[in-house]
Image (cartoon, rainbow, N blue to C red):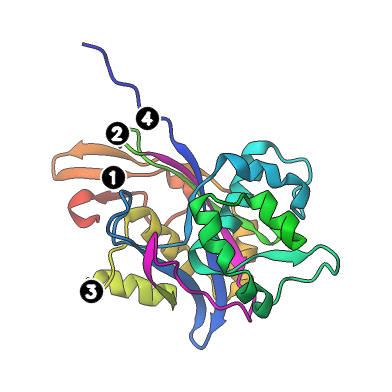
Amino acid sequence: MAISQPTVPVPAATILMLREGDDGIEVFMVVRHHQIDFATGALVFPGGKVEDGDVNARDYCDGIGEIDDLELGLQVGAIREAFEECGILLARDSDTGALVSGQRVAALEPYRDQLHGGTVSIDDFLRAENLRLACDLLQPFAHWVTPEMMPKRFDTRFYLAVAPKDHIAVHDGHESVDSVWITPAAALEGARQGQYTVIFPTRLNVEMLATSASVNDAIADARNRPIVCVTPWTESREDGRYICIPKEAGYNVSEELMADTR
């Protein structure tokens, strides 16, 4: 009998979009549509898989230096997905160098559906609207790969970014059906109370974010912390089956009984 090989993970990217709230850091999260076949109904950060055409935006990106096409696609994909899913656009006017205003983003609203549907490419959008993606505003935060036993796998990079104050975040109604600005503590408490479904990687990254006292601290903490690739695995023990991750990844847990894991 042939041994089946693990599915090759698809490159994906997500952004923890941050702002300062009355009770400290708030992060924008969306509820996945129940017809989506990955993390259905879960409270997650906006993001998705990298599209083949994302690398074509190289000439319309700030702060990318000489990065390879993989990293370029991840950064472009992260910004594109954030715009598609929550309406926040990390981009600058090519002439003035200023971040696009909330008013300008509102005028660009029709492009969200066009990008999502594939009727316009990211580079065509940027060229037509004289924009450059602000990749320099992305701070790498985490790197997770779906376990090998899963039929659908993603190789996902997590980034932090500060949401422009005048951009109005709202879910897209396609991949996500609800959204909320929420403190890490409230998201974790909501998960404990059953108000939200929060999957293991999301929960651990929310817990990591909760260790920072402010948005600036979160950016600095991520900059000073090594990013360790996390591919969870399982282990059978006398008291049950455990999900495990590398200790050096820096999360507050490195193993957990799966009966306690959503």
Amino acid at the residue labelled 3 = Gln
Disc 2: which residue = 149
Q: Residue at x 60, y 72 (%)?
A: 163
Q: Which of marks 2 and 4 precedes in the sequence?
A: 4
Mark 4 → mark 2, Cα distance in angstroms: 8 Å
Disc 1: which residue = 243
Front in this rendered view, residue 251 or 101: 101
Q: Residue at x 60, y 52 (%)?
A: 120
Mark 1 → mark 4, Cα distance in angstroms: 19 Å
Q: Residue 8: x percent and y percent? A: 42, 30
Q: Which mark is residue 7?
A: 4
Q: Nearer the viewer, mark 1 or mark 4?
A: 4
Disc 3: which residue = 193
Q: Which of marks 1 and 3 precedes in the sequence?
A: 3
The residue most toward the right is: 95
Span of residues in magenta: 153-178
**Mark 4: secondary structure:** loop
Mark 2 → mark 3, Cα distance in angstroms: 29 Å
Amino acid at the residue labelled 2 = Met
Mark 3 → mark 1, Cα distance in angstroms: 22 Å
Q: Which of marks 1 and 2 precedes in the sequence?
A: 2
Residue 133 visible in the displayed image: no
* Above or below, 126 relative to 187: above
Q: Residue 212: x percent and y percent? A: 53, 70
